[in-house]
């Protein structure tokens, strides 16, 4: 049962090096916080299973990308097969905040004409005294980019699960509305055989309610 799923969403973690992308993932998927983590080299993978509504189970496959420039060509190859992403910056590092637009533009340029559903995450909210980016600034940027904004702390486990839940539900709702559909050669969203069978059965009973699978 642990490995059973109806949908699989591929999600990419983006942001400068040391903003805490890996810390967020380890807290979410493993329930642990490690104060010092070696920088990601290339791309690491994490998996988590969630239930988005009663009886609908989603496998989240995370691509944890390296923020260093020398790995950019590697991480860029994962953009097109992502359904969603967390754009992460460090609340105590203004430069990482200023680079958010660059990350967003880089991804959106490479996935045209398709889109990736992003949320903006201000990480390390526990560093109150060292904070360099205000809530108002971050919310303004999120609004400009058309994104939801959430502040998190892997250390205090503040809003971590909520951040991933918001993104997962945003992707799922886009699927149910028909805004995201499966397309050949794209692995951002996958449906299990069981889900496809159930969807076809429903479609036969109610043709107007077709499923993206």
Image: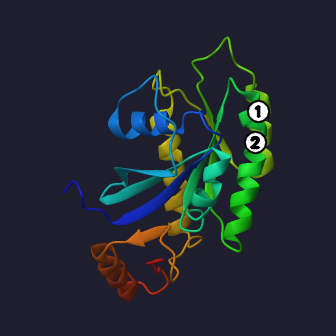
In the image, is 138 to the left or to the right of 187?
A: right
How many marks do you count on the picture?
A: 2
Whether residue 96 is situated above or below residue 169 in the rendered picture = above
**122 or 93: nearer the viewer:** 93
- Element assignment for label 2: loop
Residue at 78% of width from left, 41% of height from top?
141
Give how far across and how far down residue 204 sits, in percent. 37, 88
**What residue is pinned by disc 1?**
95
Write the residue at 67% across / 11% down: 129
* Residue at image coords 71%, 62%: 108
Alpha carbons under labels 2 and 1: distance apart? 6 Å
Q: Is residue 191 above or below residue 37?
A: below
Between 59 and 30, the one lying in front of the other is 30
Q: Check disc 1 and report its element: helix, strand or loop.
A: helix
Q: Taking 62 as reference, is 157 above or below it?
A: above
Residue 7: quadrant of the picture:
bottom left
Residue 16, image x, y percentages = 65, 40
Which residue lies most toward the front here?
70
Mark 2: give few (<14), some (14-19) or many (20+) Cα within 10 Å.
Answer: some
Residue 135: percent from left, percent from top: 73, 27
Is 105 placed above or below 69 here? below
**Disc 2 vs disc 1: Cβ atoms closer than 8 Å?**
yes
Q: Report the side of 113 relative to 58 (left or right).
A: right
Is 211 displayed left or right of 124 in the figure?
left
Disc ID at residue 67: none
Q: Residue furthest top?
A: 129
- Residue holding disc 2: 99
Indicate the quadrant where residue 151 lies. Answer: top right
Coordinates of residue 154 in the picture (x, y in percent): 48, 28
- Which residue corresponds to the image point at 40% horizontal and 63% vertical from the top-left? 8
Classed neighbour count for the residue bearing mark 1: other residues with Cα under 10 Å, few (<14), some (14–19), many (≥20): some
Q: Quadrant of the N terminus?
A: bottom left
């Amino acid at each position: 049962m642990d490995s059973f799923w109806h949908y699989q969403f591929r999600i990419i973690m983006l942001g400068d090096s040391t903003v805490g992308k890996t810390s967020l993932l380890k807290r979410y998927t493993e329930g642990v916080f490690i104060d010092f983590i070696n920088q990601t080299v290339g791309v690491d993978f994490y998996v988590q299973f969630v239930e988005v509504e009663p009886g609908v189970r989603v496998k989240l496959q995370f691509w944890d990308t390296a923020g260093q420039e020398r790995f950019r060509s590697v991480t860029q190859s994962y953009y097109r097969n992502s359904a969603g992403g967390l754009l992460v910056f460090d609340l105590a590092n203004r430069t990482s905040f200023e680079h958010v637009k660059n990350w967003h533009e880089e991804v959106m340029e490479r996935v045209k004409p398709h889109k990736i559903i992003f949320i903006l995450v201000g990480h390390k909210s526990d560093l109150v005294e060292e904070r360099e980016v205000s809530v108002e600034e971050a919310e303004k940027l999120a609004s400009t980019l058309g994104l939801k904004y959430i502040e998190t702390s892997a250390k205090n486990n503040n809003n971590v699960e909520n951040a991933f839940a918001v993104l997962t539900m945003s992707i799922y709702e886009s699927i149910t509305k028909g805004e995201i559909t499966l397309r050949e050669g794209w692995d951002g969203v996958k449906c299990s055989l069981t889900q496809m069978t159930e969807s076809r059965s429903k479609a036969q009973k109610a043709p107007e309610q077709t499923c993206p699978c």
